[in-house]
Amino acid sequence: MRDWMERQQSWIYLTFILAGLGLGLGLPGATAWLETLLWPLLGVLLYATFTQTPLTRIGEGLKDWRFLGALLLGNFVIIPLVLGGLVALLPLSLAVQAGVLLVLLVPCTDWFISFTHLGRGEAARAIAATPVLLLVQLFALPFYLWLFLGTEWFEIALSSHLLGAFVGLILTPLALAWITEWLAERSARARQLVQGLGALPVPLLALVVFVIAASQVTTVTGLTGVLMQVLLIFIFYLVFAAFLGKTLGNLFQLPTPSARTLTFSFGTRNSFVVLPIALTLPEAWHAAVVVIVFQSLVELFGMVAYLRWVPSKLIPEPS
């Protein structure tokens, strides 16, 4: 069942988004109570997701310095610089800019592994690298947002419930996941718990996007033109990320599977972690939430294209 959900997750999320929009338009008064479920759902989602990241084996991700160097250079230097320049040139509102930057600046730590495996990359190397990616982005993201959006945006973010959300919905699930994994290395029951939690991210995220679509339907309908603009940005980003993976793979002389792993890391972004941050912003900035959810959907369909294109055409086996 878990494998089926992961293969069909793009369509699952699309179905739940459309259902949420339908509920929000048809019964707008019925969505208020749904919002009370959003924060608990996000907390459990992040906890379940973090338990699938090998946090207790972070040392393994530091062994291959050539691969790690390419991974960190692409994710935390080249991509942020390109995104900062791109967003600065486009006529987007600050709220939409914030959504684009929030969702594209930091790499994914969950379905990146699944798509790497399906795309004939090195899943073991992806698993080893995910704790490093997660920890680095927790420190890098605030700096990037201050750098690209300015002090005024940072003051707006801090004046909301950002710190509470960061502690309650990111640091707390992260700490609990680490404890759970530590116990799983010593207890068969805890290992069964971790395996069971692995089936939860897809249905939980489906419920999260359903609630967001239902509660933000007026924002969505007012952003139709903007979403078409950011669609082009997200498609451009997917193409750029793919060629960046190929280029850095060649530059660092990585084996073909490692270069594919780079590509899937650059192409997948960490919407799970940044969504709670966007939800704490004032109401005038809620367009950022819609942009983040929209990017996740575009990315999933992009990954379907990656699975066909990357191993067969972009980074094929050497002849």
Image (cartoon, helix red, strand yellow):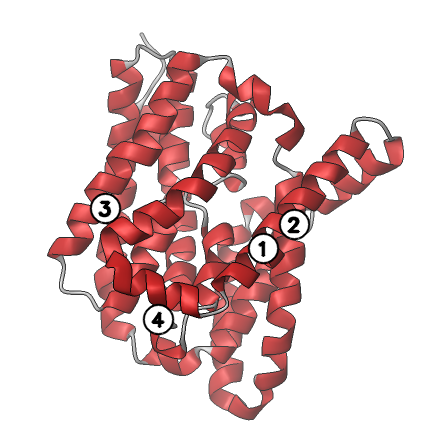
The x, y position of residue 30, in whole percent, is 59, 88
The x, y position of residue 234, in whole percent, is 28, 51
Pointer 2 or 1: first along the chain: 1
The x, y position of residue 130, in whole percent, is 52, 32
At x 51%, y 60%, the residue is 163
In the picture of the structure, the residue carrying the numbered disc 4 is: 287
Pointer 4 or 3: first along the chain: 3
* Dot 2 amino acid type: Pro
Pointer 4 or 2: first along the chain: 2
Pointer 1 or 4: first along the chain: 1
**For discs 3 and 2, the disc positioned in front in the rendered view:** 2
Q: Quarter of the image holding residue 87? A: bottom left
Residue 199 located left or right of residue 79 = right
Disc 3 and disc 2 in contact, CB within 8 angstroms = no
The x, y position of residue 260, in whole percent, is 39, 24
Disc 4 and disc 2 in contact, CB within 8 angstroms = no
In the picture of the structure, the residue carrying the numbered disc 1 is: 167
Residue 227 shows up from this direction:
no
- Specify the quadrant that holds the C terminus: top left
Q: Quarter of the image holding residue 193? A: top right
Residues under labels 2 and 1: Cα distance?
Answer: 9 Å
Residue 61 located left or right of residue 294 = right
| 40 to 199, vertically: above or below | below
Residues under labels 3 and 2: Cα distance?
Answer: 29 Å
Pointer 3 or 1: first along the chain: 3
**For discs 4 and 2, the disc positioned in front in the rendered view:** 2
In the picture of the structure, the residue carrying the numbered disc 3 is: 83
Disc 2 and disc 1 in contact, CB within 8 angstroms = no
The secondary structure type at the circle numbered 3 is helix
In the picture of the structure, the residue carrying the numbered disc 2 is: 173
Q: Quarter of the image holding residue 283? A: bottom left
**For discs 1 and 4, the disc positioned in front in the rendered view:** 1
